[in-house]
Image (spheres, grey):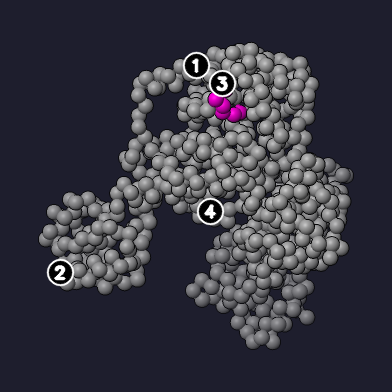
């Protein structure tokens, strides 16, 4: 038998990939292993020396590596690889993912020596991985305990652990590989290793069968929703076996399981019972949320279900702020408003419940709308943070697509695309080329031709694009693109590229439809309202010891300032926030309450402190201890400038510890100074 131990881990990894997946690009391998292409070639040369004994060879052609040999010899070489544990061939990132996955599912602490043995690396390497893992966990509201003699353990709610686990698998392998594993039962050794270690082969296979049976009776969701549902079903069964159930409020569990939207869960239970799987009501409710994929959960009207604010108000805020940053007036047409309402409504509800939002094309969106994405992210932070909602990157991507499409519609209406063809080959050739281009690109409203002699006069007509059948030396704008008189495939691609780039550039073209400059009187009024809001800032110590008492005292205080008349209406608006668990700033002991109402005469900002902590629900139904309430109330038709200032305050509350400390411990002067500094700060996107 050949001595496979002569090979390095990297060489084993390369050979195993070539054996399992067939021809691979040198560039792809170098990126996966994070080494140069020259190193890949050096390693394959060493592998060929070893493969001589099997009469097999790795060949390179056009940047592609493939293994040559008769099937009998290839089988022998493949057999020799079975001596190598698959886990030894994982790269650094994949090892970190698998370590994190095991810790997230662990019922007790795990020693780092276990991982050292599992991956055949020294403990120092494991320590290096753990530092990176810890940083990642903090972003997921989780922490890692690392104690000598105790081991490694991840602390946090099981809700956050499950969401983190599903995030992990998406960083382990591309979505296409994950779907192939689920649909086609691929033998990808990396995924087989992951699922074998975390769930075991039996549960992995059973859950594939279960999810297929379940979705035979539920309207099909998209691929990414289907895979996420598969992962959450795996987690539900695994955690039930480990006796680590999900914690959800009993009222919410009852609401979900008794609602018509989740009537399909009766059939799901029957399928599970058939396989001797019995879940608690909490796990059934949790599973229902993920099996449904966010569909049929939400009201079709403008009010976000349970969040008690009108989405159109927020959407108009986001669009206004985006336009302001771009110095563009973005028209909130019906398509934009309806498109965003239909998309954001379920997304906000999922976010308020601590459910993840997936976006498989986020990289493409960020690349195509590079500048616009950053501006929309800024606008979302300042608008949604007032409702203690952090819009994740994936969701910002979807919102960017809607606004980008609206801008493109707007640009098409403002200036139709036009093309000039410069063709010295005769009128018949020019007309034939004009007809071909018109047929290929019906969106081009104006296509005209001219000879070289008339070029200078024609170009003055401000065409969006210019093409020529000959190379031109003259410096004209826009720069002409050379094409063939026969309009070859390459020429069509050139024109497509020009059109796409032109539309993309126009989306962010500052000179088009500039944002109207506010009248001096309007600007002065904005400043007056802002100054009055700061002047009337209110700080009060309450006596309340429960949440209902706190609401009552806050409303009484605002009423005493002659700002509201209907206390019952305001009390209802504040209570609605806490019911849905979306007012708590995680880990800060502060609740943020913001709403817009016709009941208030001027915008109000106030801080109310309690003598002792009270417990209330946070995101993901985690109990949080709170002793400070920041209340921000705006008028129903509030001025955009004031809404922007309130957004700055809420963003600072989420991102700056100095404001948190001032609100909880500072006096009136401390807080006012902090607020003035925040409101005067010119933020970058």
Quadrant location, the N terminus: bottom right
* Residue 35 is one of the magenta-drawn residues: no
Q: Which residue is mark 3?
A: 600
> Closer to the observer: label 4 or label 3?
3
Q: Is residue 95 visible?
A: no
> Closer to the observer: label 1 or label 3?
3
Magenta residues, start to end: 594-600
Q: Residues within 10 Å of mark 3 (few under 14, many from 20)?
A: many
Q: Decide which of tag 1 and tag 4 comes sooner along the chain.
A: 4
240 or 679: nearer the viewer:
240
State the residue at coordinates (58%, 46%): 300
Q: Which mark is residue 531?
A: 1
Q: Secondary structure at mark 4?
A: helix
> Closer to the observer: label 4 or label 2?
2
Indicate the position of residue 627 as horizontal and vertical percent values. Answer: 74, 23
Above or below, comparing residue 394 to residue 675 in the picture: below
Alpha-carbon span between mark 2 and mark 1 = 70 Å
Q: Residues within 10 Å of mark 1 (few under 14, many from 20)?
A: few
| Displayed quadrant of residue 214 | bottom right
Q: Is residue 495 left or right of residue 615?
A: left
Q: Which residue is mark 4?
A: 363
Alpha-carbon span between mark 4 and mark 3 = 43 Å
Q: Secondary structure at mark 3?
A: loop
Residue reaching furthest left?
A: 453
| Displayed quadrant of residue 122 | bottom right
* Residue 599 is one of the magenta-drawn residues: yes
């Amino acid at each position: 038998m050949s001595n496979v131990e002569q090979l390095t881990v990297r060489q084993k990894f390369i050979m195993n990939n070539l054996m399992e997946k067939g021809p691979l690009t040198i560039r792809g391998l170098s990126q996966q292993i994070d080494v140069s292409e020259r190193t890949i070639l050096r390693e394959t040369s060493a592998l060929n020396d070893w493969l001589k004994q099997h009469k097999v060879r790795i060949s390179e052609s056009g940047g592609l590596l493939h293994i040559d040999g008769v099937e009998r010899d290839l089988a022998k070489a493949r057999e020799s690889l079975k001596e190598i544990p698959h886990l030894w061939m994982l790269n650094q990132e994949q090892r970190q993912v698998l370590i994190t996955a095991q810790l997230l599912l662990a019922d007790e602490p795990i020693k780092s020596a276990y991982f050292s043995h599992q991956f055949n690396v020294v403990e120092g390497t494991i320590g290096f991985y753990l530092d990176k893992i810890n940083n990642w966990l903090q972003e997921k509201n989780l922490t890692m305990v690392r104690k000598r003699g105790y081991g490694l353990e991840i602390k946090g709610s099981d809700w956050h652990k499950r969401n983190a686990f599903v995030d992990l698998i998406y960083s382990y392998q591309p979505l296409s590989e994950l779907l192939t594993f689920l649909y086609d039962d691929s033998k990808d050794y990396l995924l087989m290793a992951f699922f074998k270690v975390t769930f075991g082969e039996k549960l992995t296979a059973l859950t594939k069968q279960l999810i297929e049976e379940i979705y035979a009776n539920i309207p099909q969701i998209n691929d990414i929703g289907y895979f996420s549902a598969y992962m959450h079903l795996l987690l539900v069964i695994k955690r039930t076996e480990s006796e680590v159930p999900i914690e959800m409020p009993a009222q919410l569990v009852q609401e979900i399981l008794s609602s018509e939207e989740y009537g399909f869960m009766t059939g799901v239970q029957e399928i599970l019972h058939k396989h001797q799987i019995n879940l608690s009501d909490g796990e059934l409710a949790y599973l229902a949320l993920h099996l449904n994929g966010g569909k049929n959960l939400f009201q079709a009207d403008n009010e976000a279900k349970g969040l008690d604010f009108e989405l159109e108000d927020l959407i108009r805020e986001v669009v206004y702020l985006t336009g302001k940053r771009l110095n563009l007036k973005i028209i909130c047409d019906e398509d934009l408003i309806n498109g965003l309402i239909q998309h954001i409504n379920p997304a906000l509800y999922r976010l308020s419940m601590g459910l993840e939002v997936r976006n498989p094309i986020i990289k493409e969106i960020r690349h195509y709308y590079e500048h616009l994405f950053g501006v929309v992210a800024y606008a979302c932070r300042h608008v949604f943070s007032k409702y203690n909602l952090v819009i994740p990157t994936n969701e910002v991507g979807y919102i960017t697509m809607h606004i980008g499409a609206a801008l493109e519609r707007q640009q098409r209406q403002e200036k139709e695309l036009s093309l000039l063809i410069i063709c010295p080959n005769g009128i018949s050739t020019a007309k034939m080329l004009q007809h071909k281009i018109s047929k290929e690109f019906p969106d081009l409203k104006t296509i005209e031709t001219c000879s070289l002699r008339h070029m200078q006069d024609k170009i003055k007509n401000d065409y969006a694009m210019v093409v020529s059948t000959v190379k031109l030396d003259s410096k004209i704008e826009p720069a002409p693109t050379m094409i063939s008189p026969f309009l070859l495939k390459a020429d069509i691609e050139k024109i497509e590229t020009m059109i796409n780039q032109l539309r993309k550039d126009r989306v962010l073209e500052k000179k088009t439809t500039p944002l109207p400059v506010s009248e001096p009187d309007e600007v002065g009024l904005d400043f007056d309202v802002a100054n009055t809001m700061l002047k009337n800032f209110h700080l009060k110590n309450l006596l309340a010891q429960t949440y209902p008492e706190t609401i009552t005292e806050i409303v009484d205080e605002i009423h005493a300032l002659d700002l509201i008349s209907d206390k019952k209406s305001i009390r209802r608006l504040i209570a609605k926030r806490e019911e849905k668990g979306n007012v708590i700033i995680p880990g800060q002991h502060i609740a943020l309450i913001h709403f817009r109402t016709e009941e208030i005469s001027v915008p109000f900002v106030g801080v109310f402190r309690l003598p002792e902590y009270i417990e209330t629900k946070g995101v993901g139904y985690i109990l949080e201890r709170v002793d400070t309430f920041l209340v921000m109330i705006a008028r129903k038709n509030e001025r955009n400038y004031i809404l922007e200032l309130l957004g700055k305050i809420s963003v600072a509350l989420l991102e700056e510890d100095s404001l948190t400390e001032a609100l909880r411990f500072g006096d009136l002067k401390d807080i006012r100074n902090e607020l003035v500094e925040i409101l005067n700060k010119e933020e970058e996107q």
